[in-house]
Every structure is written in structure tokens, then in C-alpha cells.
Amino acid sequence: MTATLLDGKALAARVRAQARETLAELGVRAGLAVVLVGDDPASRVYVRNKVRACEETGICSELHAFPADAGENEVLERVLALNRDARIHGILVQLPLPAGIDSERVLAAVSPHKDVDGFHVENLGALVAGRAKFVPCTPAGVLRLLQHGNVRIAGRHAVVIGRSTIVGKPAALLLLQRDATVTICHSKTPDLAAHARQADILVAAVGRAKLVTADMVKPGACVIDVGMNRLPDGSLAGDVDFASVKEVAGWITPVPGGVGPMTVAMLMENTVAAARESG
Ligand code: NAP
């Protein structure tokens, strides 16, 4: 069996085009501020991709870059100033922040109305309550890929590997809200493979290259690979062993070209929603 590919790159282009159309219809100017502290090479690549996506979507982006030794107060003050800036509808703080800066304090300083990453506790709480305004972009992208691929969620067993606040937990909540029966696995889960094999929908959000192998996948299951792992040769690999799993799964996302581009597209959608709300 060869799985159907869930093409995140193509779907992301459609989501961006739709966001662009919505902006044109609304006749508003949307602004996204990206706060970047330090010179982590991966963060620089992510920020560049987001700025480029803004250009393609017609969103005005501003990069607020700080050196690695910037003080927490300096960053907090900038976030507070951006909260007050009427030209800015979305504020994104690129994680991870350097050691010495308390990420939770900085994220808590972002106005929940401009929190287009959905990381503020108020927005995370709203997600738990089923009244989310801004859903974290990566899990939102996972859900959109499933919906676009016509993968049935209600009544199915979804297994999410990983319980981070920005990916695993919100992905599990979104699947639960759509009536899946959800199991969350993590580093202390004994016999991960046995849980994974139960999954009709398997979401891998771990950060371990090729952790999910073909023997861990139920034939015909939908496998969503959130992982982005840089291999020693510089290439990018997901958490799923794509070559073997695609022979067993019913649907699969590639890395690159799966969840990654969807994350950026959902950020564009959230920013347009924030601009619409403010207008
Ligand atoms: P994270 O905060 O490090 O969380 C990783 C999770 O995986 C934790 O819950 C951890 O369990 C669990 N885990 C670690 N080893 C495990 C094992 N051997 N078996 C089962 N579970 C294990 O990472 P994250 O921020 O959620 O990101 C996960 C991956 O997604 C990374 O590769 C990251 O680069 C990628 N990512 C991709 C995108 C995208 O746009 N495609 C966006 C965000 C993240 P404990 O909780 O017990 O420690």
C-alpha cells in the first residue's frame, strides 16, 4: 500500500491566497510584528519564512531583532509598546528565547488580542474551554490538513506523541473537540509502539528523527509528522520514517512540505483574523 500524500505546501499556498483575498475584501492593512532575540540559526530561518509569507499574503511585517544579550525588560518594553501600536494586529515572539529571559513572562505580556501564535494562557484556556480565538498555528495546521484530506476524525482513535503546550496538547484538544478518542503519549509512556499501533490518526510531535517506524503504524492509518530534525548531513527529517511508513499508512505528510508550511499559513490566517477584529 502506498499512502496518499497530504501536501502541506500546496494547501498552505491556498490558505495564504484566501487570507490575501479576505484582506482585500476587508480593505484593511494588517500588521504583524516579529520579535526575535539572539542569533539562533533555525529561528532566523523560521522568521525569514514568516516575513516572506507576509509579503505573499499582503501583510505588513516588522522585524524587532535584539542581540542575544538583550535584557528581559528591554524585550518586555518592546512587547508592551507593540500592544499599544494600532498599526500592529499580531505579535509573534520567536521561541526559544535565550537563557536569562523568562519566556513565560514575555508571552504573558503579549496582548491576548494580538496573540496570533495562541500561546498566551488566556488563549490556551479558551482553547480548553472550546472557545478558542487564536489556536496555536502548528496544531491548527495539522487539523486543516486532516480536514482538507477528508480524513474522518469523529469516532476515530487519535494518538498524539508529544505533550508540549505549543504542539502536542493543543493538537490533542482539537482532535478531542472533533470527537476523536484521544491518547497522548510522552517520554514516560511505556510501550509507545503498542499505543501508536492503536491509532487511526497518529500525530508525531517529538523531535526525534525517524522515531515512528512502519511496525508502529496500523495499516491505513493517517500519519501526521510534525517533527523537524536536522540530521548531521544538514538535511531535514521528520519524526516518522517516511520511506517505510508510507507503505503501510493510508495518508502521510512529508517533511519538508507537510506541517511546516501549514504552520506559517495558519499564522497568516490568525493575523488576518486579528486585523478583522480590530477594524
Ligand atoms: P518539545 O517541547 O521538546 O516536546 C517534545 C515532546 O515529545 C515532549 O512531550 C516529550 O515528552 C516527548 N518525547 C520525547 N521523547 C520521546 C520519546 N522517546 N517517546 C515519546 N515521547 C517523547 O517539542 P515541541 O516544541 O512540541 O516540538 C516537537 C517537534 O515538532 C520538534 O521536532 C519541533 O522541531 C517540531 N515542530 C515543528 C513545527 C512545524 O511547524 N512543523 C512547529 C513546532 C515544532 P515529555 O513531555 O515527557 O518530555
Image (cartoon, rainbow, N blue to C red):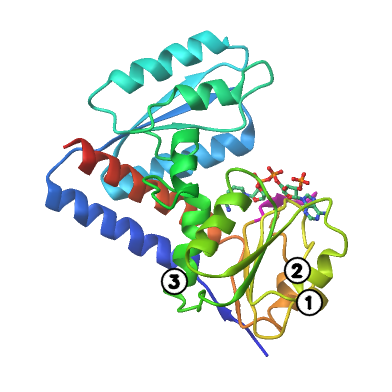
Question: Could you say whether the residue bearing mark 2 is in a helix, strand or loop?
Answer: loop
Going from N to C along the chain, the mark reached first, 2 or 3, is 3
Which is more foreground, mark 1 or mark 3?
3
Q: Residues within 10 Å of mark 2 (few under 14, many from 20)?
A: some
CB at disc 3 and ligand 1 closer than 8 Å: no
Label 2 with label 1: CB-CB less than 8 Å: yes
Location of residue 202 in the rendering, given as x and y in whole percent from the top left corner = 66, 69
Q: Is residue 192 visible?
A: yes
Q: CA distance from mark 1 to mark 3?
A: 24 Å
Q: Residues within 10 Å of mark 1 (few under 14, many from 20)?
A: some
Res. 239 image quadrant = bottom right
Q: What residue sits 59% from the left and 25% below the top?
A: 103
Location of residue 34 in the rendering, given as x and y in whole percent from the top left corner = 43, 30
Q: Is residue 120 visible?
A: no
Q: Amino acid at mark 3?
A: Gln
User: Can you identify the residue that label 3 sits on?
Assistant: 147
Which is more foreground, mark 2 or mark 3?
3
Location of residue 4 in the rendering, given as x and y in whole percent from the top left corner = 56, 82
User: Can you identify the residue that label 2 sits on?
Assistant: 241
Q: What residue sits 50% from the left and 78% below the top?
A: 151
User: Can you identify the residue that label 1 sits on?
Assistant: 214
* Residue range of the region highlighted in magenta in the rendering: 227-233
Compared across the picture, whether 2 is left or right of 25 comes to right
Going from N to C along the chain, the mark reached first, 1 or 3, is 3
The verdict on residue 232 being magenta is yes
Q: What residue sits 32% from the left and 49% below the top?
A: 56
